[in-house]
Image (tube, rainbow, N blue to C red):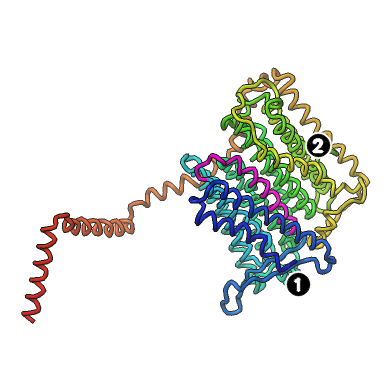
Amino acid sequence: MEHLLWLIPAFPLAGFLVLALTGKSMPPVWVAIIGAGTVSLSAIFTIIIGITFLSLPPASAHYVQTLWTWMEISDFHPEISLYLDALSLVFAFVITFIAALIHLYSVAFMAFDKDYSRFFACMNLFVCSMLLLVLADNLLLLYLGWEGVGLCSYLLIGFWYEHPENGYAAQKAFIITRIGDTAMAIGIFVIFYQFGTLLIPDILAKAPSLWQPEASMATITALLLLAGALGKSAQLPFQTWLPDAMAGPSPVSALIHAATMVTAGVYLIARMHVIFELSPTVQLIIAAIGAATLFIAGFSALTQYDLKRVLAYSTISQIGYMFLALGLGAWTAAIFHFMIHAFFKALLFLAAGAVIEALHHEHNMFKMGGLRTKLPVVFLTFVIGSASLIALPLISSGFYSKDQILWFAWASKNGNPLLWLIAISGAFITALYTTRMVMLTFWGEVKTEVDRLPGKLITIPLIILAFFSICVGFIELPHNFGSLTLFSDFLHQVLPETLLKSTASGEVFFQLLGALATFSGIYTAYILWYKQPEHLEKLKRNEMLLRLYSFWHSGWGFDQLYQTLIVRPIVFIATINKNDVLDKIYQGITLISVALYRSLSFTQSGSLRWYIMGLVVGAIIILGIQIML
């Protein structure tokens, strides 16, 4: 089956090319068939190849397909070569399967948009780029996919470019992620200089023999790669672009900014785990950044009134849990939470999009309410996604993935009580803002009447994602629940076993503490935003709490800080530098060109007699010159 591996990214690439070149002249039905059909074919082939892959013995559990040599410069000859192992298969499955459902949803959601074909062309290009990123066998091809998803993110955040704020949000995302991408590019140069190759398997095999633990080059390289991961995954200090990215259509938020692109940083760290293991200091930094991000983003989510911005901050927070797990060396727990999060967060964004569309593009949760009877399917699926987000014990997939991270924060060899305390506090905050979101949107009085009911193309993907949000978690049970560990056993072909510093005997106690944090958050939100809202009104009258609320709502002031320290000084210097000597040279060239143009334009009077006279005079002059010579 390895000879068919190229078809997985090829289908969405073909869809992009067809739609980009001829989409405007196509009927909408053909745009939908090509846009959604090519991604669906990619998902089908991923499943078929994955089934064959699962039958391989562990020792040879990878596929490699080399398509052609990209370039040849001396001994440097990178190839367009695809590599499929357990880790890339998990990502490829999530990308294609969820993308297929989101494209199906988009057929109806974007049906009345004037740029229907442009939307599907960009979405297809994104899926192709993301698949190249996770299937690349060398860092150069991975970086091509990495920059490709950045480009598509820019195009889709600013998709409705008629509104200037959408263009600003797209520029903000593009510029901020470029900071991390530049550091990552430098890291790739360092790796090539050190190893003489960009082949990922060769780098991972050579690294332990080339670098000793805590070697300076290992630390520098890990930090450079980490910067790229932080930018793409919207972690501190680069998290400010993701909430503004909600300017794009809801399917974009579901696919790019929840399920796939923002987890590219998680993939990069997991894929290059050998380099990070050689620098425990960087691993501690990853864990600390993840813990800080999940805590900060959780409080910001608690104060938002825009439904999609709540989910955006929630995404930042949940990826923080993944980074915490990566920093702890709990590689399989991080990837397990990635997969579960992709299902329930895509579900929540799509359900939120259905709510917003049904209420004639209303985003404010405080103008919603009473929708559980008006939109029963959307309500039920949204509640299922919310249950998984808050890790409702036993019945939701999110419980099984987040429980692992909480346990490793305490019991892994890199864990400590502070990281565990922050993680479990984050679980309480997650339950608090998620229950608040559900209460404001679906309970209480109807504040905005439903304008349009969602059709089957909207509800069917929601139902499928809701099913997976409940069931997928059961493929990996906690240690004290039994011996079902299919997911970690599968990933251990690629990622190392996580070492615990204690046995699982105390795991039940920590699971009960996690459940207590979750139910406490649910109950607190129920009291404050539904049962006894007068308590909330009392809190609002406290001036200190109001200031804190405003501070959290602004994203802890990071945007203002960056405006003060970076943006305004650069704009100020650029303003001073606007009319320097070099600029005057170019301005002079421009003025001369314009003057010459205007002089010559007088010869184009439009009068035929002047043109004939010009030809006659010119002929006389030429003949006179010839006679004189």
**From what the image shows, is residue 331 above or below residue 194?**
above
Q: Does residue 297 appear in this view?
A: no
User: Which residue, as the protein is rendered here, is positioned at the far bottom?
Assistant: 629
The mark closer to the camera, 1 or 2, is: 2
Viewer-proximal residue among 220 and 231? 231
Residue 628 is inside the magenta segment: no
Magenta stretch: helix, strand or loop mostly: helix
Q: Specify which label sits upstream in the sequence, 1 or 2.
A: 1
Q: Determine which residue is flagged by label 1.
A: 209
On residue 392, which mark appears?
2
Q: Secondary structure at mark 1?
A: helix
**From what the image shows, is residue 6 above or below residue 583?**
below
* Residue type, mark 1 in image: Ser
Viewer-proximal residue among 513 and 359? 359
Q: Residue at x 41, y 50 (%)?
A: 574
Q: Secondary structure at mark 2?
A: loop
Q: Residue at x 85, y 54 (%)?
A: 486
* Residue type, mark 2 in image: Leu
Q: Residue at x 73, y 53 (%)?
A: 284
**Where, by quadrant of the figure, is residue 516 drawn?**
top right
Disc 1 vs disc 2: Cβ atoms closer than 8 Å?
Answer: no
| Segment colored magenta | 89-115
Q: Position of residue 134 (x, y in %)?
A: 68, 59
Q: Position of residue 375 (x, y in %)?
A: 68, 29
Gap between marks 1 and 2 measured at Cα: 45 Å
Residue 111 is inside the magenta segment: yes
Viewer-proximal residue among 107 and 421? 107
Q: Position of residue 621 (x, y in %)?
A: 9, 71
